[in-house]
Image: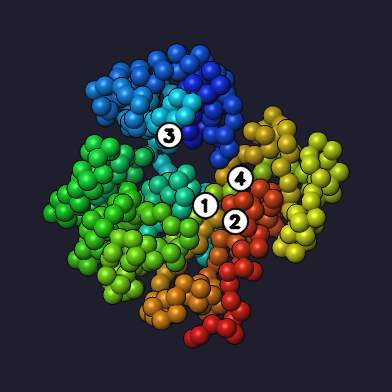
Amino acid sequence: MLQHSSDIHFRIGEKGLTRILYRIHGELGEAGHLETAEGETLASTIILSMCDQAEPSFHSNRPQSARLRKEFLRQVGLFGARYEHYPTEFGLLAVMRLIPDDGHNPPSLTELGLLPEQIALLEQMLMTPEGIMLISGPTGSGKSTTLRTLCRMYMELTNGTRHLLTFEDPVEGGIPGAVQCGITADRSNPEEVSQAWASALTSGMRLDPDAILVGEQRDRNSAMASVIAALTGHIVLSTVHTPDAIRILDRLIETFDVSGSLVIDPQVMMGLMSQRLVQTLCPHCKLDYAERIRAESLPALSALQKNLLAEHTDTQRIAFRHPDGCPHCWKGVNGRRAVAEIIRPDAMFMDMYQRHGKLQTRSYWVHYMQGITRRAHLQHYLNAGAVDPLNAHFICPLDEDKRLLLPREAVHV
């Protein structure tokens, strides 16, 4: 179970026990339990004895962060593991984020689930001389993995003749040919963290980089440092938290207070990407539509669900998750793949955003730039019977494009 887990949760003191849960393919499941005292001992042992970046004392009454030492990671095939705890009403919630060791070999963009048209756009971005590319998505949506894959692609496109420098907190996997640097700061002190990132990027500019990976755009300091790097002839790859690709521009301007004239410059902002992960079905036990309707072990489809499927899918091609799974999978699921939106802004796109805002710009991107929305990306999986549409609806609503896109004739070109 551990090898498929992205996170382990310890709910210390809940219902008089320490409940242990694993997150597998995006879902939390019960793995076992300990006595409350055993959970408290485990948490304190992790902080005091198993970490190389942690406070010298264990405090259950306030938040703490830590990073496990390499010697413990190698024993279970991990590249890294982050520890975080926070006091709760029942006691203490501790979570460990697990980073698997892929041997400095991140998956290809095709393996991540991207379409050929999307991969071609990313290749065009990486072949430009300078600019910022930002990837957005919720926590656990695979942004860091995609960043590593893009870095490998950049090094391959340049035949390893470029200097790629990374700043990460923590380093989340090896990148062949890159010089990777971890950021060290007291994570309980936001001001210190912000200053550490700004100082690292300022110093990095003096280390003769051609391209820079910045693990995350956290505040105005890191955002402005990235803009300056792009303005001085560098490629910058980074992540940011927004619900979709176009809102990256909103966040830079409204939250990070970056000048709008810089944000809407397509030479500076060369790429916008947003992604989420959907579960892929086990091909050995998935159910077709007729089997799903007949399945007595599953709740009957509601009228709303039937209408959604009838209006937004081809019921002859879709498939559904088997509730029990089979020996080939985990509860009917065999992995996760990305549904993504990838935008290479041009002058018209940025002018549309400046004059008419997000709604018009998104519709312009789809109707005039042949943009592929995440809903359109999802349709490829649905047509192949690779993703359960009802499960995917919670990640990417089946009616999302109907709700968010204007008709072509309503776009003010």
Q: Secondary structure at mark 2?
A: loop
Q: Are marks 1 and 3 in contact (CB under 8 Å)?
A: no
Q: Residue at x 47, y 22 (%)?
A: 12
Q: Secondary structure at mark 4?
A: strand
> If you read the primary sequence from the N terminus, does the residue marked by circle 1 or circle 3 appear first?
3
> If you read the primary sequence from the N terminus, does the residue marked by circle 2 or circle 3 appear first?
3
Callout 2 environment at 10 Å: few (<14), some (14 to 19), or many (20+)?
many
Q: Secondary structure at mark 3?
A: strand
The disc at residue 97 is 3
Q: Give the labeled residue for mark 4.
A: 279
Report the amino acid beneath label 4: Gln
**In the rendered view of the protein, which quadrant contains the N terminus?**
top right
Place of residue 261 in the rendered image (x, y in percent of width and height, measured from the top left): 28, 75
Left or right of 411 on screen, residue 196: left
Left or right of 196 on screen, residue 2: right
Left or right of 163 on screen, residue 411: right
Callout 3 environment at 10 Å: few (<14), some (14 to 19), or many (20+)?
some
Place of residue 121 in the rendered image (x, y in percent of width and height, measured from the top left): 45, 66
Q: Give the labeled residue for mark 1.
A: 276
Q: Nearer the viewer, residue 94 or 280?
A: 94
Report the amino acid beneath label 3: Arg
Q: Nearer the viewer, mark 2 or mark 4?
A: 2
> If you read the primary sequence from the N terminus, does the residue marked by circle 2 or circle 4 appear first?
4
> If you read the primary sequence from the N terminus, does the residue marked by circle 2 or circle 1 appear first?
1
Q: Secondary structure at mark 1?
A: strand
Report the amino acid beneath label 2: Cys
Callout 1 environment at 10 Å: few (<14), some (14 to 19), or many (20+)?
many
Q: Are marks 2 and 1 in contact (CB under 8 Å)?
A: yes
Place of residue 124 in the rendered image (x, y in percent of width and height, measured from the top left): 40, 67
Q: Give the labeled residue for mark 2.
A: 396
Q: Are marks 4 and 1 in contact (CB under 8 Å)?
A: no
Residue 374 appears in the figure:
yes
